[in-house]
Every structure is written in C-alpha cells, then in structure tokens.
C-alpha cells in the first residue's frame, strides 16, 4: 500500500490526464460447442467490445472495461464506445475521480448521443464499458479491489455517485442515505466473514439447452458435490424436453436442492403462466426472464399467477427506470442486475439501493465473458454496505472463459472468494486479447466457421 | 399504372434479388440556428443514418430509408445498419414481398444481434431504416404511395405483417382482425375525403426553446392564420420562462386554439405534476414527454394528477411492449408513434392496432429530418383502415429541411395533402445527400463549427 500513497501524492501534484481510449473487437467462437445456448440465443459467440483507458501519469495502471455481446454486432458496440471517446480524452484524473457522479452524468447526458437511447441498448452499454473502465483505473490506482474501494466510501460519498433523475418517486437521496447508514453497524464483521467464507454462488453450467441429458445429469450432480447453493436449467424450447430435463435434474439433485429455470424471454404472458405451471411439479425455485424484459406489467401478472414459484429478471433490463418500475409494480421476487448492460457501476449502485428500499434480494446475472469477474464486486459491496445480508442471495457462476482474464474469479466450495487484486477484474490477458481479436486474431484463423451467417450460408 | 403491371409480371418471371444495402452518414448543421432546441437537446444537428437498397431487377427503383438522429453518434447507427446487411443481401424480392412479416422477423430475431437491444435503441432503429426502405421499394414497385398500398391490403394481409410476440395479453390476432374489419365500411368515402381535405396538422415550428419571444409570437400568429389545428411550445428549462412564453402564446392564439406543451423528458414525476400545475392557467391541451419515456407507471401517476391536461408520449418509446403497457396502465391520452424509432412499418401497424383496441388517438411525432415525409403515410392509413376517424387526431408538422427530399410533404390550409407519388417518401435528393454527407460533404466544409464537441472545445 505504501506505493499507492506515493502515487496519490504524485497525482495531486501533476495534472495527469487520460490520453487514450483504445477499443478492441474480441470474440470467442463458442457457438460450435453450444455453450450459452438457450431458447432465444441458439448459437452465441461470446464477445467483448473492449476498451482500455490510458493516461500520461507516471507508472499509472490502465483502466479496462467492456460490453458483453454474443457475436454479430460487437463492432456496433465498438463504434459506440468510439463515439464516447471525445467526452473522455484529455480530462484530468483528478477532475474525474473527485466527481465520478459528474463524470457519469457527462457520458449519459450528452445532448446529441442521448438520442440513440436514451439510456438503453447499444449506447448505454457503451457507457457501461467506459464507466467501468474508469472505475477499474480508479481502484487500481487506489490499490484496492473495487468491492473494497466502494465499501470504504461513506454513505454521503456513495449518494454523490448516483443519478436520481427519474428515481425520486421511488427513492430520494435522503432515503438512500438512510439505507446506507443503517448498514454501517456490523460492516467490519461482515467483511471478515466475506474474507473467510466468500459469497454464495449458483451454477448455470449444467443447463444449456444444447446439452445432452447425460451431460446435464453429470454436471448437475457435480454442482451439488461442489457446494453450490442452486442449479439453473434453460427452458422454453419444447415443453416435453423441459419436463424430461427438469425430471432428470430433480432426480440427480434431490428434493431439497434449489433448481431455477430460465426461459430467456421466450413466452407471452399467458404462455409463461401455463408453461411454468406445467413444470411446477418439479418445484422450481424461480422462473427467470419469462417474457420481454421490457414488460413490467407482464412480469407482475406472471408473478401473481405462478407463486410460490418466484419471478426473476434483470439481465436485459435497460436501465434504473425499468428496475424502479419492476419494484413499484411488485413484478419480481429476485432482481438480477448485470454489470455492463445498464450504465456501469454508478447506475448499479442506484439499482442496489432501489432493491434495498423495496426489500427485494439482488442475485446478479453473470456468465458470458468476464461477467463473473465484474459482478462479484457489486454483490460483495451490496452485502457489506447496502443490504447487509446474504439471506436469499446467490451469485450466478458459469464455468467458462475465465482463463482469459488476468485475475479470474476464484470459486471455493461453491462460493466466490473475495478478490484481493486491485481493480474491477475486467483485465483480459494480452495474449487472449490478441488471439481472439475479430476477425484477424489467430483464434479466428483456425476456428470453425462459427461466424458464417445463416443468411450467407444459404446462398 | 400500366407500367407497374408489366413490372409485376416481370418480377414473377425472374428471381430479382437485393444486390446492395448502401449506407450514408448525412448530417445538417442545424445547431447554429437553435432549430430543434429543447430542454434536453440544446444543440441538435439533424441527421440521418441513411440506407439505399438496390436490386438487380431491370428498371427497378431503389428503396430508401433512414434512422433519424441529432448528430454525434449518427455513425453508430450507420454501423448498426451495416450489421444488418448480411440478413438482406441476396434475398429475392419475391421472397421478401410475399412475406414482409417474416422478413421483419428475420431482422429483429437474429439470435446474436438481438442481444444489442433486444428491440430497442440503436439496433432497433437500424431495423426501422431497413424495414422502411424495403417498404419504400415495395410501394414504388407497386406504383402506390405507402398509405394507399397499406390501406388496399385486406385485414388478413395486415395481420400477417405483425409480430404478436409479447402482445397477446393485450391484443390477439383475432382482435386485430375484428378492428380492421370494423373499419372496412366507409373506407372508400374516407379516402375521397382525404384526397379532398388532407389530414389535420399542428405545428411545432414556433416553440423551440432557443427562440426569442418576438419570434415565438410572430410564428404563433402565423400558425393560426395558416389553418393549423394546434401549436406546440417547448417547456422545462426555467419555469419563469415557460410562464412568460405560455402567456405570450395564449395572448397571440386566443383562448380557444389548442396549445400543447412539450417537456422532452425533463422532469421527475412529482416535478412534472408541480410544473404542469403551474402552467395550467394557460389551458394547455397536452403535456408531452413529461418524464422518462421508459416510465410507464410514472406517466400513469402524472396523468391522474394533471387531468384535464392530457398526457402524450411515444417518440422515444422503444417498442410495442412499452406502448402496450402505456395503454394497459392508462398512462396516456395521446399516443405519439415515430416512424423510425420502433422497428419500422410493421411494428407501427401493431402499435396503431393496440391504440385502436384501447380507444386512444394516435397523433404521430414528426419534424426532425424527413419524419413528416414518412409518418404522414401511417396517420393516413390509420384513418382509412384502423381507427376510421379524425376525431382528436392531428399530425405534427415542423417547417424545415423538407426541401432536401424528392417528394416533400405538401401542407394546404394547415393540413397534410395525401401524397400521390409512389413510395414511402424517404428519398432524399441526391445533391442534398452528397452535400450533407459527414464530414466531407460541401455543406460541412463551409458550415460553422457545429460539430466541435463541448469537451473538445474546452481543452
């Protein structure tokens, strides 16, 4: 830590600035193994529109961040990050780190770029990549993992990071302060427990729709043995398949182990109610993304009809306004935030506070490419400084592509170990970045034809 | 029309295909004159991510379409249209025109690209540009303006164009058929009236936030004299300014002329209720975009509080699922669809039918660049084949940039004349396309520094 103190002093003396916002189109040809296959996304190539922020500070680390996509269109996200570059280049680090709430506001509030959302889809995910990269840089310079940096902030400092626009009918700054202050007692003790025991996790690895029954059974059994709290199965393709796969899973994991289902937006409201009802005999814990991620009232209707099966959603919820309404409408039992679909750390802090206000547990979305590495920091911050509890909390885990990150997640006995390396965990290993750069990295030269487009192939 | 018949026969005999999907980044330096300025968008440069679809059919017209943006980020929309190209190139025109519902489904349903939305923001606006360009091509080949092509379809043909996914809890295919069949009687008579009298319009030209009081007064007086049904004023900057501008406008237009207000997403829920209340003495007809376009429950709360002032929104509503909920929640009095924010003609037909189901009038958003040229077709189709009425209908009109289009809208006595030229009206004049191509067109060479970014300028 002594080096860090020196750095901080140096930073105050010289006006260090951001000198580069470099983007990379990185794709993994995962589609040929059906990893990640679900009822709506049959052939994902897990990808990142990746950004590295560089500075002119002596010995300064870089800030790394990315948007997660599933292949085609990753270049559109890269273009969106490029469009944000003029808002970032040349700014001093002091100016940014002294007011990270203001910096976030500059990115989401640009009077021309906001038309592309507003605050949703491609442009908002690009904001997430840049905001998260700046937080990564900040945490590295402070010598702390992000969860620790955040949980060491005062309630007042945290509230200053949030954009309350469109939220005040559900959460005011004063209410946010109250929530954070109520969580102060016991924080040190929770941090000790986090270091000792880690954060509970569940696994989605067994349940991809493209996997065989044998593979499902073997992986489900392994998940129980490994100490996970829950398993998740993809559903929504064919009902007969879902019934068979739920039966197999339930037989393997026994009657008391939690089994969640994930429909990936497959159904209309009535269909979601009917289909979930047909799977109720297998006692699912939650049904995830039963319908459109935009359909607040639809989720509320489904929740009323399928109880005691819980309703979970959020990985595709576009922003805090959607989450606010899911909570106001009583539409969800479980809130599944994503580290880089909404506008990055700042907006996710607001979402954690909204969830706490409404008493709804947050079980973040992960998997994909690097999402576990990122979102663990937010879940741990929630435990230490917002909700103050692990009750009904569990963090998604998917066992692939971690080897490409400089500081991959560590899972012990089915739980996430608290990261100790400074930063936000987004840093990809340089050799992986090079090899999987699309379309000219070495991995794509030798990859199967995962990128050939259905439309092209048929011609 | 005889040439058209021949073309149709030729089309059946040869497998004509789409050979090019060419994109253009076109921007108008409007920011230096404060046209389009509002409480959230202080300096728009009206822009189009423009697409031309070309075929190998002999003597075939081109299909033109675009996304409207307000400057920076237009290149991101161009990249998104480029990402759709492989889904379009090489397809036969017969295949597309025989099943335009299926073609729409291919664009919105791509298993990798949908991750960028789903069905919202940059990627969905790109779908709109391509879908609308294909409809433009179709209408040109059939020798009809789009409104006429659409209203000549049978109810069954129209229903086949729609994607009912996520809609069936509010609108089923059978209900849509019923609505369309109920509108059949009197259709020919309404078409005659449309040709004779045009479609009622209101004007936003006087009310931009950046205009002086004198200019506002002069333009407001002109709007009444010109025969428009309504005037619209931008609000939400400073309350004292809004009170003064509303007073001036009301004095000029008299007590009985409709005056709408537009806050362009400026407020939180409580603020919207309070601010609208402060302007109630000027008897506004509607308050438009009082808060976030994603906030269905917020709009419902505002509507309950500000009645009899009506609540209008929709130009930034991301898709049919948001519109469905605005209607289900009783959140709006006026539905303002946009021709190219949702997924183009197909999704807008669904939205028109949803509005009819709930008995809410559609008063489309227009202005911008070419939006009047497009959306008039949808409003006229609604009159002829869906709602069957002009009661409380009025179509936005803004008086700028029409001269850049091959077939600009015609306004007579404050009403839109029914277009007679085949197509969807999107075709920009080639010389304008060239001159305003960004950043190397001749208009940008001589333009003031409207593109210099605030962040860059301060360095």
Image (cartoon, coloured by chain):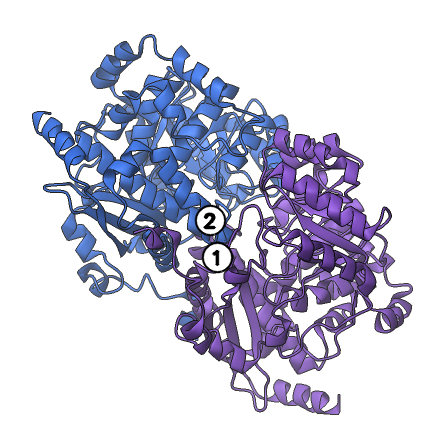
Chain colours: A purple, B blue
| Residue situated in front as seen by the camera: A402 or A343 | A402
Lateral position of residue A69 relative to residue A375, left or right: left
Q: In the rendered view, would you say A382 is above or below B149?
A: below
Q: Looking at the image, which residue sits at the far front?
A: A214
Do the residues bearing badges 2 and 1 touch, measured as CB atoms within 8 Å?
A: yes
Q: In the rendered view, would you say A27 is above or below A52?
A: above
Q: Secondary structure at mark 2?
A: helix
- The residue labelled by disc 2 is B121
Say the numbered circle drawn on residue A457: none
Residue A160 location, quadrant: bottom right
**Residue lying at 72% horizontally and 78% vertically, measured from the top left:** A144
Q: Is residue B3 something one can see in this rendering?
A: yes
Q: Secondary structure at mark 1?
A: helix
- The residue labelled by disc 1 is A123
Tell me where residue A352 appears, x and y as whole percent: 73, 55
- Which chain is indicated by disc 2? B
**Residue lying at 54% horizontally and 67% vertically, measured from the top left:** A66
Quarter of the C terminus of chain B within the rendering? bottom left
Tell me where residue A139 appears, x and y as whole percent: 67, 76
Quarter of the N terminus of chain B within the rendering? top left
Tell me where residue A159 appears, x and y as whole percent: 72, 60
- Which chain is indicated by disc 1? A
| Residue situated in front as seen by the camera: B410 or B210 | B410
Lateral position of residue B180 relative to residue A223, left or right: left
Q: Are dots 2 and 1 on a single chain? A: no
| Residue situated in front as seen by the camera: B376 or B62 | B62
Tell me where residue B107 appears, x and y as whole percent: 39, 45
**Residue lying at 15% horizontally and 50% vertically, measured from the top left:** B430
């Amino acid at each position: 830590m002594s080096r860090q103190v020196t750095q901080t002093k140096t930073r105050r003396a010289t006006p260090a600035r951001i000198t580069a916002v470099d983007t990379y189109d990185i794709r993994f040809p995962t589609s040929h193994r059906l990893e990640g296959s679900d009822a709506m996304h049959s052939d994902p190539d897990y990808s990142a529109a990746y950004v590295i922020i560089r500075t002119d500070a002596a010995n300064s680390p870089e800030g790394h961040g990315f948007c997660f996509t599933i292949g085609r269109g990753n270049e559109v996200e890269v273009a969106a990050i490029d469009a944000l570059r003029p808002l970032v280049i040349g700014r001093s680090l002091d100016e940014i780190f002294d007011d990270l709430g203001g910096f976030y506001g500059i990115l989401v509030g640009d009077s021309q770029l906001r038309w592309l959302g507003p605050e949703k889809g491609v442009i908002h995910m690009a904001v997430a990549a840049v905001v998260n990269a700046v937080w990564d840089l900040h945490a590295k310079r402070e010598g702390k993992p992000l969860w620790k940096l955040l949980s060491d902030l005062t309630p007042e400092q945290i509230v200053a990071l949030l954009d309350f626009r469109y939220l005040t009918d559900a959460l005011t700054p004063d209410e946010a302060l109250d929530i954070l202050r109520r969580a102060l007692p016991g924080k040190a003790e929770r941090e000790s427990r986090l270091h000792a025991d880690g954060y509970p996790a569940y696994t989605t690895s067994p349940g991809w729709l493209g996997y065989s029954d044998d593979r499902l059974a073997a992986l489900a059994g392994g998940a129980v043995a490994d100490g996970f709290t829950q398993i998740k199965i993809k559903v929504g393709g064919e009902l007969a398949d879902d019934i068979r796969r739920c039966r197999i899973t339930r037989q393997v994991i026994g009657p008391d182990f939690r089994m969640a289902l994930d429909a990936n937006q497959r159904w209309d409201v009535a269909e979601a109610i009917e289909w979930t009802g047909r799977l109720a005999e297998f006692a699912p814990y939650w049904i995830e993304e039963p319908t459109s991620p935009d359909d607040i009232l639809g989720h509320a209707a489904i929740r009323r009809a399928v109880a005691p099966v819980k309703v979970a959603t959020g990985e595709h919820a576009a922003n805090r306004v959607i989450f606010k309404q899911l909570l106001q409408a009583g539409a969800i039992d479980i809130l599944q935030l994503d580290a880089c679909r909404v506008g990055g750390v700042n907006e996710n802090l607001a979402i954690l506070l909204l969830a706490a206000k409404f008493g709804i547990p947050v079980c973040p979305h992960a998997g994909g490419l690097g999402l576990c590495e990122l979102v663990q920091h937010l879940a741990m911050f929630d435990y230490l400084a917002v909700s103050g509890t692990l009750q009904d909390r569990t963090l998604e885990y998917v066992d692939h592509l971690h080897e490409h990150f400089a500081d991959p997640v560590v899972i012990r006995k089915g739980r996430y170990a608290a990261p100790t390396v400074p930063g936000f965990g987004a840093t990809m290993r340089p050799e992986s970045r090079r090899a999987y750069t699309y379309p000219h990295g070495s991995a794509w030269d030798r990859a199967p034809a995962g990128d050939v487009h259905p439309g092209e192939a048929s011609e």
